[in-house]
Structures are given as C-alpha cells and as structure tokens.
Amino acid sequence: MNPLAAQLNQNIQTGNEHVYQMLSLLGKEIYFPKEGILSQSAEAGKLAKKYNATIGIATEGNGPMHLEVIQEKLSAYNPKDLYPYAPPAGKPELRSVWRDKMLKENPSLAGKNYGLPVVTNALTHGLSIVADLFTDEGDAVIYPDKNWENYELTFGIRRHGRLVNFPLFTEDQRFNSEGLRDALLAQKEYGKAIVVLNFPNNPTGYTPGVEEGKAIVAAIQEAAEAGINVVVVTDDAYFGLFFEDSLHESLFGQLAGLHPRILPVKIDGATKEEFVWGFRVGFITFASEHQDVLSALEQKTLGIIRATISSGPHPSQTFVLDALKSTDFEQQKKEKFQIMKGRANKVKALLDSGKYGDVWSYYPFNSGYFMCLKLNGLSAERLRTHLLEQYGVGTIALGEYDLRIAFSCIEEEYLEDLYDIVYRGAQDLLNA
C-alpha cells in the first residue's frame, strides 16, 4: 500500500476506528498524491516568479490562451476564471460560500463538526465517490423501493453492493421508518450498511415531516448502538423545494455527531437547487467529530477525483459562485420557488377535485419536481406508451402501476390539460 494511503488510514483509525472499518478496499487504498504534477505545479505557482513551465495549459499575454469566438460570448468574465484547470477540490471561494449557505439553510448544523464541501461533477459524481470509498462487494446498500434508478448502477453494478429495499410508505402514507429500522438491523451479522436518504424523494416528491425525521434518525441510531457501522448518505438533490409542512432541513444536521458508528455524508449541489442542470456543479461534505478524519476523507475524495475526472469544470463553478454572491440571487430564487410551488399546488387541487374518478390514487407529495400516480389495475407501461403514441405526452412508468409525472417542466396553465389527457388515455385502455 502506498505510504500516503497508509498514513491517511492511520489518521482515520486514530480518530474513529469505525469509520476506518466503513472504507471499501478502494477507499483504503486511495490517496491524493503529494509529490506529483499538481503539487509541484502548486509549489511553482507560489515560487516561480520568472518562468512557470509546469502545468499543461497554454498561456498568452500573461493569461490563459483562448479563442475569441468563445471569449466574446463570455466577455463578462476574466479569462483566468474560465480557462485554467480548477483545483481538484473546486474553487476555494465557492467551497466556502457553499458551506456558509449550508449552515444558513440548515440551522441544526450550528455547533456541529463537518468539513468544507468538495466540488463534484454534480450529484451523480458525488454518489459515485461515496460508492467507491465505502462499498465493497456484498455490502448492504439500503434505500426505499421508490427510488432513483441510478442508485442501482452506482452502488450495485459499479461496486457490486447488495441492494436492500424497503417500502417507502406505511399503510397510512407516512415514511416507513420501521422498514428502514428492520432493514438496518438485519445487517447486524455483517456489521456495516450504507443508507441512502433522498428528500425530496425522486420519484414521489415526498419529504417526511418533523416527527418522521426524528423516527428516521432514531432508527439509524438504534442500528449504530447495535454495533452496525452506518454510512448515511443524504441525497439532497432537490433541497429547498419544500412546499408544505415538512422537514425544511437536511437530516445531515441531525445525524452529524450523533454516534461514532454513524458517518453522515451530504450530497447536494447547484444542479437543481439553483436551476443550472447542465452546469454540473455538486458538492460532497462529510461530518465527523475528529478533524483528522475529515481531512483524511477529503484527501481520499480528492484521490478519487484525480483518478477519474481530474477536476471539475472551471467556468460553471465561476458562474455559480458569482450567482451565489449576487444581491439579486435570493429574490430571483424565491420567484422561481413560488412558480414551482404554484405548480405543485395546482396538481394537488386537480387530483383532489374528484374529476378523475377512481382510475388512480396518488402517493403523498409536498416538495421537489415530481409526483407519482398509483394506477388502479392498469399497467403503467401500457399507459405510458399509449400516451406517447396517441397523444404525444411523455411520462415515466415505474414498477407495475406507478406513473411519474414531472410538474416541474409543465407551465401551471397547462397542467389541467395534461392530467385530462392522462385520464383520457387511461379510459381508452380501461374501456378497450
């Protein structure tokens, strides 16, 4: 094993033996090189006052070389904030500003010990880093039965994790914390589990209430007290889009510092929070009582980044940083939030109006981009293809009877027409 990796492992073991046990084989072996191109270039950047011939970019006129056909479209920005490589961990100021934003929006983080967010190439990349660091073949990866299908690729196919699902909802349509508890305690013989919590949930658009959140945290704590090391990933992709009386914070804050056998990892980003999907700017943040553990996990994260994408895109980090610092940011974001909330409320009013009879019911939704219809005895895939082929309407079939509809991408004035068409398509099939 590389001595740098061994030293990082020792730092983690000294700080928290349980976190060391959570690491995958790759997680134990990975490290960020201290003596390599990046470190030598960084040193030269400070000391090479005459000529700096280290890093692989081209320069011209005391700045990065660039094409005018590109720069003319980006003339509001200094070329130095666009064209050079961003640091593997991301722009330092962006990391600091995002951390401040996290604390402001999650007051439960006050007084907790958590690291500086590391920039990822959006949230999928952050989840992939978690999978690489902590998932070995056969490790249990626990998440609800209604989920984003990419979890299977990220944790199951790529890392051969053992996927364990439990029903998202109880019979009274609340979050099934007992199901989570049972799935966790079933891993006692293995001594380890990775839990993925995604709120607002994709595909249902559900965020638990405050008491449900406490029950989730209690289930995880019970597993830790039973001797199970638990990596808890809060996939906060749609964070902030809370339209009703639910949790308005990430559970990351409640989990931070809760138990030595619990390692909270927050995955979030500008992608959906700030409506910049194509910019691919996300973050990964660890919480631990031990600074040496946080530092070592950051170095291992940088090792994964260096070995995969090297570093994230610089221009989009600059764009997001400038937006976060703008005096207009909060007001503009509030305006978009109200539009999204209006669409969600419109959908709920339509579904509760009684005009669609008993063709479907719907799963609870109070946040995010989506909602899910639960079709009564009608194949979701049949309805999906029928709507697409006969009406030119696209939806997503999930499982046998669930149909996901993204109200996020339909103007409020057209929502009634959309649901009328879905209902008409269902009637076509039921009466055929």
Image (tube, rainbow, N blue to C red):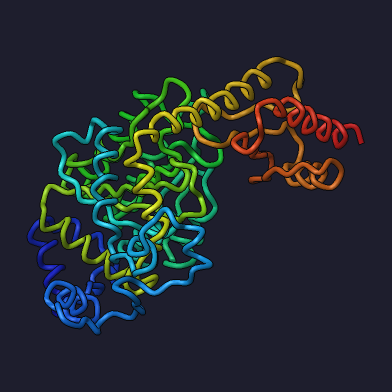
Residue at coordinates 37% horizontally, 55% vertically from top-left? Answer: 317
Choose top left, top right, bottom left or bottom right for residue 12. Answer: bottom left
Q: Could you say where residue 106 lies in the image, as x and y percent from the top left?
A: 28, 33
**Which of the two residues, 154 or 70, is positioned nearer the viewer here?**
70
**Which of the two residues, 97 or 181, is positioned nearer the viewer here?**
97
Q: Quadrant of the C terminus?
A: top right
Residue at coordinates 44% horizontally, 46% vertically from top-left? Answer: 143
Identify whether 223 is placed above or below 417: below
Choose top left, top right, bottom left or bottom right for residue 417. Answer: top right
Identify whether 84 is placed above or below 384: below
251 left or right of 361 in image: left
Residue at coordinates 38% horizontally, 31% vertically from top-left? Answer: 330
Q: Could you say where residue 306 lies in the image, as x and y percent from the top left?
A: 32, 72
Residue 254 showing in the rendered view: no
Residue 356 showing in the rendered view: yes
**Which residue in the rendered view is the most extreme toward the front?**
61
**Which of the two residues, 322 or 353, is positioned nearer the viewer here?**
322
Q: Could you say where residue 299 lies in the image, as x and y percent from the top left?
A: 21, 65
Count of numbered circles in the view = 0
Q: Quadrant of the N terminus?
A: bottom left
**Which residue in the rendered view is the most extreme toward the right?**
432
**Which residue in the rendered view is the most extreme toward the left?**
14
Residue at coordinates 32% horizontally, 71% vertically from top-left? Answer: 63
**Which residue in the rendered view is the most extreme toward the top?**
353
360 left or right of 1 in image: right
**Which of the two residues, 144 or 49, is positioned nearer the viewer here?**
49
Q: Could you say where residue 383 lies in the image, as x and y percent from the top left?
A: 78, 41
